[in-house]
Structures are given as structure tokens and as C-alpha cells.
Amino acid sequence: SYKAKMIVVTPAVTSAHRSVRVGGRSTMFLHRVVGVALAAAATGGLLAGCGAAPGPATGPVAAGAAPVASQERHNQDDVVFLQHMLTHHLQTSTMSDLAHTKATSLRVKTIALRIKAAQDQQITRIRNLLGAWDAPDSSSGEVPGLLTDQQLQQLKAATGNDFDQSFLQLMIAHQQGAIQMSQTEVAQGSDPQARRLAQDTITGQQSEITQMQKLLQPT
């Protein structure tokens, strides 16, 4: 292909040499310039015709092309924490419902409703995270602070001021168990959302414990 290109170029230069004149004299300088330009064009066409292999793309990698492993932010401690907290919070709702119907003190009723509202919001967050991880929402093993069946039955059977006192005492121990689990999650968990939930639990439930301890003090 190289020889073919040169045959085409040579007559073009010769033709230009014969046809262009200024004042009866050949413009040799002009012919040389035209010849060089045509030769360069022919060489460029030859290189393009040979099909040089394109180089590798060097543009930025799209965000969606990130390795899947980098998206796996949670570990087994996160999963166990959320599963245990879900079991814990569901029992909290049961205890708070009892206080709503059986407590005699308005302040006990009020704090029970406040606790239930806060933990219902966390239940939604917990289920959303477990669902996103395709993890079951059931727990196994001991859950700190969880009431035994016997303790729950005794609370259901209590009435009047005895119920108020039992509810506050059991709920304090219950919330302390949640704080214990949350502290473990902050230390050992890796998912930012699960760790944030744990920190929210520590802050919120410590405040609730302080309020309930004040209600237990004789007035």
C-alpha cells in the first residue's frame, strides 16, 4: 500500500510544477512546499490505513463499577445486634401497652408512651437494615435485659401502685440491657447505620432510666 500512495503523489507534484508560473519563471519554492505537504498527507493516510490499535481508555471509572466488596459494610456483630434489639424492642412495646392500661400514675403512663414511640421508630430502622442485608429478623441466644416469661406474667398480674413500681423496676433493667448491647455494637460493629442506632439507644435510654429512677423515689 505504501508504493501505491507514492505513485499517486508524484504526478500531483509534477503537474503542479508544470502549470504554475510567475513572470515566466517556475515557482520551484512553491512546488517544494506543495510536494512536502502532499507527502506528509500521504504518510498520514498510510498510517491511518494500517489501523493502529487504539490505546486503553483512561477516563474515570463510573461510580457504579465499584467492587461489590466495598459495598458490604456490615459484619456479623451488626446482624446479631439488630436481631437482639428487635426482640428487645418488641417486648418493650408489650410492657408499655400494659402500662398504658394498668398504670395508676399519669407520669408512669406518660413515660411508657414516650418509650414506646421512640422504640417503634427504631423497630422500623432495624427491619429496614435487616431486610437490606437479607438477614432474618429472628434472634437466637440470650438477649440482655429481656424479661423472662415468669416476670412478664407477674407484671400482667400486678395492679395499682404495685404495678407502677414493678413496671419501673423491670423497665429500668430492660433498658440497661439495651444499653449493654449497644455499647458492644459501638465497639465491635462496622455498619455506620447500625452503630448510629446503637449510639441513639445509649443516649435515649440512659435519659429514660434517669427519669424512671426519679419516679421510684418517694415523694
Image: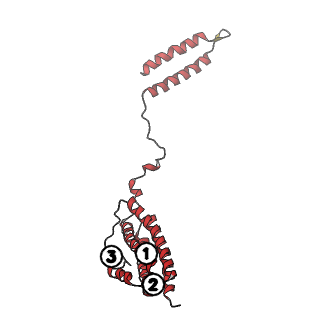
Q: Residue furthest left?
A: 141
CA–CA distance in space, label 3 to label 2: 27 Å
Q: Nearer the viewer, residue 185 or 130?
A: 130
Q: Which type of secondary structure does the marked residue at label 3 adopt?
A: loop
Residue 23 sits above or below residue 5 on the image:
above
Report the residue marked by disc 3: 142
What residue is shown at x 49% (from left), y 23% (from top)? Answer: 42
Front position among marks 3 and 2 = 2
Label 1 or label 3, whichever comes before in sequence order: 1
Residue 43 sits above or below residue 94 on the image:
above
Residue 216 sits above or below residue 43 on the image:
below
Q: Name the side, left or right, on which 219 lies relative to 137.
A: right
Find residue 85 and report its image quarter: bottom left
- Label 1 is placed on what type of residue? Asp
Report the residue marked by disc 1: 97
Q: Which type of secondary structure does the marked residue at label 1 adopt?
A: helix
Front position among marks 1 and 3 = 1
Label 3 or label 2, whichever comes before in sequence order: 3
Find residue 151 and report its image quarter: bottom left
Residue 56 sits above or below residue 77 on the image:
above
CA–CA distance in space, label 2 to label 1: 13 Å
What residue is shown at x 47% (from left), y 67% (from top)? Answer: 121
Q: Residue furthest bottom?
A: 218
- Label 3 is placed on what type of residue? Glu
Q: Name the side, left or right, on which 102 lies relative to 23.
A: left
- Residue 199 seen by the camera: no
- Residue 89 seen by the camera: yes
Where residue 21 appears, as percent x and y from the top left, is 64, 11
Where residue 109 appears, as percent x and y from the top left, is 49, 78
